[in-house]
Image: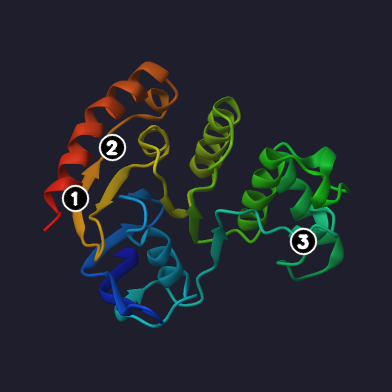
Amino acid sequence: MAQLLVDIRAKHFREPAQGRKHVLDGVRFALAAGERVALTGPSGCGKTTVLDIVAGLDSDFEGRIERPPQSHIGYVFQEPRLLPWRTVADNLRLVLEGPREQVDARIRAVLAEVELLEEADTYASHLSLGMARRAAIARALVIEPDLLLLDEPFVSLDAPTAGRLRLLLLELLERHRPTTLFVTHDLREAVMIAERLIVLSPPPARLVADLPIPLSPAERRREEVVERLRSELVDTVGDLVMGAVP
């Protein structure tokens, strides 16, 4: 049984100058429990819109989203969206309920996993961008989500920092096994983390490919293996996207 079913038949935006803008036109796929899936496509094709619809933040579309009732959803946005006047621990505390002692223990455990335990009492405004992105991931994980959504979580980071955080995210996903859907423009990121790659066309976007990424955990940590598969996918994904242009 699918942990998540996405069936978006159509999505339009209302814009003053253009009227109704057709954004999505036939995006249907399913994720099994614990599966990791990357969503890619050209800029502006509606990838973030898909995540917002899945998260329930946008209900103005034709189609349906099916997920288990009362499932917990963690969302990592493109920007960390931390409250700058609160500490890292307090930002996580905002999404938790329960006895203070249990909440604090849960926060400490998750911050240790993302290597931010020493920054628990640091104000979010004092964090580097890499630290802020780790704090955002911690905030999404601290609720123990059944479904984790990530929208280009490492965009605008320098290459070494992004590489370290991809490895950290991979380790976290392998350990916790949430069903995961994430948007990326970086095929190296998709190959390293995802088990499947879903490709969207230019808008109005439709699904043009659903490709397996059959690498073992060890292979995902070998740069030469990741780069070889990334190189193979570059032409494939480009041809699929260009072939979808009317």
Query: Sequence order check: which comes first, mark 1 or mark 3?
Result: 3
Write the residue at 22% across / 44% down.
211
Amino acid type indicated by mark 1: Ala
Classed neighbour count for the residue bearing mark 2: other residues with Cα under 10 Å, few (<14), some (14–19), many (≥20) = some
Q: Which mark is residue 83?
A: 3
- In this rendering, is residue 21 above or below 123? below
Check disc 1 and report its element: helix, strand or loop: strand
Q: Which residue is mark 2?
A: 213
- Measured in 3D between alpha carbons, the distance from the residue under mark 3 to the one under mark 2, in whole angstroms, is 37 Å
Determine whether 111 is above or below 9 in the image.
Answer: above
- Give, as a three-letter code, the residue at label 3: Leu
Marks 3 and 2: CB-CB under 8 Å? no
Q: Is residue 243 left or right of residue 173?
A: left
Residue 203 in the image, given as x and y percentages of width and height: 26, 62
Residue 79 lies in quadrant? bottom right
Residue designated by label 1:
209
Separation of marks 1 and 3 at Cα, in angstroms: 38 Å
- What residue is shown at x 81% (from left), y 50% (from top)? 125
Q: Are marks 2 and 1 in contact (CB under 8 Å)?
A: no
Q: Earlier in the sequence, mark 3 or mark 2?
A: 3
